[in-house]
Amino acid sequence: MIKITFPDNSVREYDSGITGIEIAKSISNNLAKEVLSITVNGDIQDLTRTITTDSSIKLHTWDDKEGKHAFWHSSAHLMAEAIEAIYPGVKLAIGPSIESGFYYDLDMPEGTTVTDKDLPAIEKKMIELARLKNSYTREDITKAEALNYFENKGDQYKTELISDLEDGTITLYKQGNFTDLCRGPHLPNTGYIKAVKLLSIAGAYWRGNEKNKQLTRIYGISFPKQKMLEEHMILLEEAKKRDHRKIGKELDLFTFSQRVGQGLPLWLPKGAMLRERLENFLKRVQKEHGYLPVITPHIGNKELYVTSGHYAKYGADSFQPINTPAEGEEFLLKPMNCPHHCEIFKARPKSYKDLPVRYAEFGTVYRYEQSGELHGLTRVRGFTQDDAHIFCRPDQLKDEFKKVIDIVLYIFKTLNFENFVTQISLRDQVNREKYIGSDENWEKAENAIIEATSEKGLETVVEYGEAAFYGPKLDFMVKDALGRSWQLGTIQVDYNLPERFELEYVGSDDQKHRPIMIHRAPFGSMERFVAVLIEHTAGKFPLWLNPDQAVILPISEKYNDYANKVADMLSKEDVRVIVDSRNEKIGKKIRDNELMKIPYLLIVGEQEENSQSVSVRKQGDGDKGTMSIGEFASHIQEEVKKLIEVKEN
Amino acid sequence: MIKITFPDNSVREYDSGITGIEIAKSISNNLAKEVLSITVNGDIQDLTRTITTDSSIKLHTWDDKEGKHAFWHSSAHLMAEAIEAIYPGVKLAIGPSIESGFYYDLDMPEGTTVTDKDLPAIEKKMIELARLKNSYTREDITKAEALNYFENKGDQYKTELISDLEDGTITLYKQGNFTDLCRGPHLPNTGYIKAVKLLSIAGAYWRGNEKNKQLTRIYGISFPKQKMLEEHMILLEEAKKRDHRKIGKELDLFTFSQRVGQGLPLWLPKGAMLRERLENFLKRVQKEHGYLPVITPHIGNKELYVTSGHYAKYGADSFQPINTPAEGEEFLLKPMNCPHHCEIFKARPKSYKDLPVRYAEFGTVYRYEQSGELHGLTRVRGFTQDDAHIFCRPDQLKDEFKKVIDIVLYIFKTLNFENFVTQISLRDQVNREKYIGSDENWEKAENAIIEATSEKGLETVVEYGEAAFYGPKLDFMVKDALGRSWQLGTIQVDYNLPERFELEYVGSDDQKHRPIMIHRAPFGSMERFVAVLIEHTAGKFPLWLNPDQAVILPISEKYNDYANKVADMLSKEDVRVIVDSRNEKIGKKIRDNELMKIPYLLIVGEQEENSQSVSVRKQGDGDKGTMSIGEFASHIQEEVKKLIEVKEN
């Protein structure tokens, strides 16, 4: 008999040789139907592999990323099988699961191309093969055998991959007539895959290197139920409408220029105003919470990053050093603000009475990403963190952590991200050699986070092994209006940088002590946050945030003067207002400005001019009647006040 | 007879062979006493050189930089003569005039060193030699003769300099027993030099290269009157007290870190608050004037600067390109914001109705400076420009220029820089091949500036040949409280970048036209401006700008609670206030906080707590009596309002 320990620390005994699917069945038939893969002692495996020693396990369903991963990875193999059946001679490169679905890179037979029109036939073949319920079987062979197999098959990409592997056991997975080089894990059989949609075709260089051959990449997604696919397709349709790149262009918020460089956003006036308003909002909140602003340069001497350890860890994959034309100095674009803030902490001696100090900076940082990875404002090469670093004494850690949680919750509330989950990332329970700092400090820090979140009443998920090497952290994942998860705010505890920078304060005992550092960024970055906000609100920003709160539409050019007068009066009352004085029909003006998602449209003509008033239309809410100019200004001011103030209580 | 044209375009006739000093004498004996050098047809010369053809001339006195240059350059030669007399065998490197005085780099004889103690003896010798009224005489010889002379003298530095010169005539200057390789010009004789002060000794590498020998550099200054030297020494003493590096440290405004890199300021909280307040002030003014904010990255693809022409012109002397770890891209740290703003202009099609557009950005730029050139916040490697670019039609140029002048004047007035001069920099009147753009455009632009400044009633100095190669400009030089001049704001007209970036708008004629660009930065940079503001105010910033407007001083720890309560109440009234709750005597607290230059000190003890009041001391103005908390808040609000508002009218 072997002992199996479950995630809740309960233990059950089973015969040696039991499989994951059998364990699931021993709990309930329903679970057995839903389970997709299993983690055994930290290793994700097939449900059909036997377990022969005492083990800690976790069963994964569709709700876990490990479950989806096995499902989509098996679907990629299924797609490859279907494609081999339809296009004999196709050569296969790699076919992984991704965040949402899977893809396979193919070298199509000479003279053959796949287009969108061909995808339904592949989908049909996949479903046909899935219904055969062929098992995914795992086979360990030697490297020589593996090479031999794929050389015979004539698949040069797999041969190349195998050649690069170390000598030893190579794993193959087979289902039906298809064999692939693969580490797994996979579903028990193809029958799990009930619904498939192939989404798009793209070009992709072999191994991501533009000097290599361009292959054909087919993206797809699959589900255990047809209804789930249908829901997903509706979501995709809605997501397309809310794509921040599309809305960012429509609302003139930001742009990119090839000449400036890919992944480097240029904020247009409306976007810059929106971002500035968000920054001012955060600055106000931070000031109220005792943060101090600092400003640091966007480069640092290489030495700074050698000290911080970033150069050794990330130097080779980063933007390369900047040399000076004389004097032989080397600088790096800053990938984070923390080393600069450590130097500011060091600039003046500190006493225990000075702590905590909280340095805040909207610091723009630069990190190299491959061009293929870039995506609108969510994956960029330069971004501005809403960054702050708190330097505190050990006895202040929990309190400071709670105060940061307060800020994050207040911000999420004010911006209508009411739906979020928090994840506490702790050390791996077993392998502890990869973490720096004493066990005692780690326990203090982990307990501080656990207690702080519990005292703040947060529902948290604890993930072991997900901590950074320098300390545990708390992540906030918000759900947007479409139910999609976005990782935003992070709070991290750090023992490493204070050590490396030899930060000190003089304690009440007159001895030198090392402070603890907290990194925190409620938004993560302004770029990412604005992207999420756009997709969450579909561009209909809260009234207090919108660059333009109202647009005045004169019904003909005769009333442009009155419109400008109204605009001046409203501006004096701090209402952000523009005038659409184009010589267009009023109907077209209304339509155009509704597309620009301006919250209020104020129509003015003879009647309004005579009564010194405006006819008010609210975006998505229709006609609100006629108001005097003063009434409308108060109306806006009240609404803004309500949006911000209600949240503060 | 030859015709001599004066700067006011008046013409007089003289015999051929007349000298500058004789021309001066022909006007007045007083002028002849004051004149120090002369510009003849654009070439600065000795007053004793003969003029043999029709010429345009300008006579220079102490009030012109050309006059001072000759005076100080002659003083450097005089110092060298004195040093040769005292230290036989000294070898001479270079000895120029500088912005304020002169220096000479010396290779002292083996075993000899010069220290501060030796300077009075050198000064004495200089005055002794000056009284001999030895003439500075110019001699043209061949390169071979020059080499021969300095080889015989054993002066290897001069020999090296001569070897690098092209073959042809070499100029020597002699006075008394001293001969130097020199282009001149010089004073007629040493008798002009009445007062000398040698200021400091420093090390300097030969030719600025650290691989070469380190020489001894002696700095000095000299004047035509003893009284001027005395005044200068008082000014130096006062300037030392106001040195922004000293005050910046005392007031905790900024710091530098070797590990971050020299010339890269780190703004500490108080400095960041000051800067942010200045930026917000400018943002408000710019918003009122129709500027639109934009935000751009701190790097740009090399291609961007190849397009702008900066790479060809400055690439080799700049921070070197940043390579990517893959994909072979090259980026540059941005040395200016204009190319990015051109790309923003290009991002959307523009019509004549859209112009002018005014893009504003507090854009941080990076320019390489040799470490020896760096100086506090006035000469740095990274700085934030209060930058904006206006794109307008030709018919809008003058009006836009006037609007920019309005902004600059308003800003100078609000910040108490009432004393300034403006310089219009136009094309050289003769050599026009170095300027780009059509004659017609240049004339339009030059006239626009001349008319705009005259319509705004500015007193201007016109300098021909000082325009940038891409357009004319207007510079503002403010005088600080010590009468020192600082170049701050610049307004430049640019035809070049719109051409290079192929910027276009569709005119009312439906044809494509090229806009004109105006570059403008009222402060120049935040770093430089803050430095000037510190030296101008000696750190006593205007009340509306000071990071802390008041500090509350409890007379003992017993009243700390009341002090904190007062602070809370004042904060709610938008008064920026801190509490000095240290356990120190009230006398020491008052002294310490006066040194921190906080405008108001509020002393609280039993009496104040009982009457819910504060005892008010104003910085530099003593006791202002007791006020209720509300009264004090109103008092501050009124004072701030007056400081900002009065200036607006």
Image (tube, coloured by chain):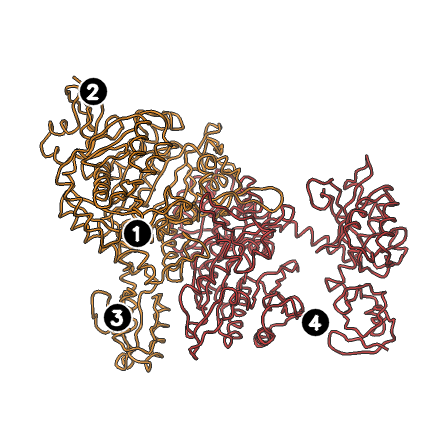
Chain colours: A orange, B red
Point out residue B539 in the picture as x, y percentages from the top left corner: 57, 52
Of helix, strand and loop, which one carries label 2? Answer: loop
Q: Pinpoint residue B588: horizontal percent, then vertical percent.
A: 54, 42
Residue identified by numbered label 4: B430
Q: Quadrant of residue A33?
A: top left
Residue type (three-letter) at the residue carrying disc 1? Val
Helix, strand or loop under label 4: loop
Find disc 1 in the rendering and name its residue. A532
Q: Quadrant of residue A41?
A: top left
| Identity, as a three-letter code, of the amino acid under mark 3 | Arg
State the residue position of label 2.
A52
Q: CA distance from mark 1 to mark 3?
A: 26 Å
Check chain identity for marks 2 and 1: say if they share one. yes
Q: Is residue A610 left or right of residue B485?
A: left
Q: CA distance from mark 4 to mark 3?
A: 59 Å
Give the residue at mark 3.
Answer: A591
Relative to residue B216, is residue A254 drawn left or right? left
Nearer mark to the viewer, of 4 and 1: 4
Residue at (32% x, 39% y) in the render: A402
